[in-house]
Amino acid sequence: MRIEISVAGQTLQLLDDAGQLLHQYPVSSAAKGVGEQMGSYQTPRGRHRIRARIGDGLPLGAVLRGRRPTGEICTPELMAAQPDRDWILTRILWLCGEEPGKNRGGQVDTMRRYVYIHGTPDSAVLGVPGSHGCIRMRNADMVDLFNRVPVGTPVIISES
């Protein structure tokens, strides 16, 4: 099983071991485009893998901060009270780069940049770039994907 993310298409595809499409989800990658540098707020390219799965069993819309649930559930009122907050909701699939010098190690380390696949508010627009570097998904889609993939699942992020 593997995940392929297209930045141009703003899609995430889940493929089986034979390369057959199991499911496709709309996503949102970084508003600032692609890039690997620490502090760039860009989505890193290349070969990655899921290093950690966080949030199993949390309700839809559960707010996570620092990879821990805050006890909050995202609501329009909570979002209005904190309009500049980067909402990480429901589940996290924490990515680790697999290519030393490109997305692993030093100032290009995907994991140390805290790049995730994660849930986002249902009001967020998907299909267009808009994140701070992560891959955002609808909460229900995030749960579906989370339940299908184990730690170690390969993830390819490409511009095409």
Image (spheres, grey):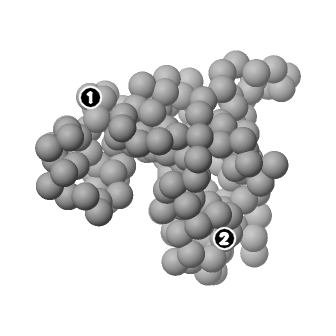
Residue 107 lies in what quarter of the image?
A: bottom right
Label disc, if present, on residue 59 of the rendered structure: 1
Gap between marks 1 and 2, in whole Å? 32 Å
Could you say where residue 61 lies in the image, as x and y percent from the top left? 28, 35
Residue 134 visible from this viewpoint: no
Secondary structure state at the residue bearing disc 1: loop
Which residue is pictured at 52% across the width and 77% down the height? 39
Residue at the spot 22% in from the left edge and 49% down from the top edge: 79
Rendered position, 135 above or below 16:
below
Type of amino acid at the residue the image marks with label 1 = Pro
> Would you say residue 14 is visible in this rendering?
yes
Q: Residue under label 2, please give it.
A: 36
- Mark 1 is surrounded, within 10 Å at the Cα level, by few (under 14), some (14 to 19) or many (20 or more) other residues, namely some
Residue 52: percent from left, percent from top: 49, 46
Residue 59: horizontal and vertical position, in percent?
A: 26, 28
Horizontal arrangement in the rendering, residue 84 relative to residue 1 (left or right): left
**Where residue 135 sits: x, y (%)?**
54, 48
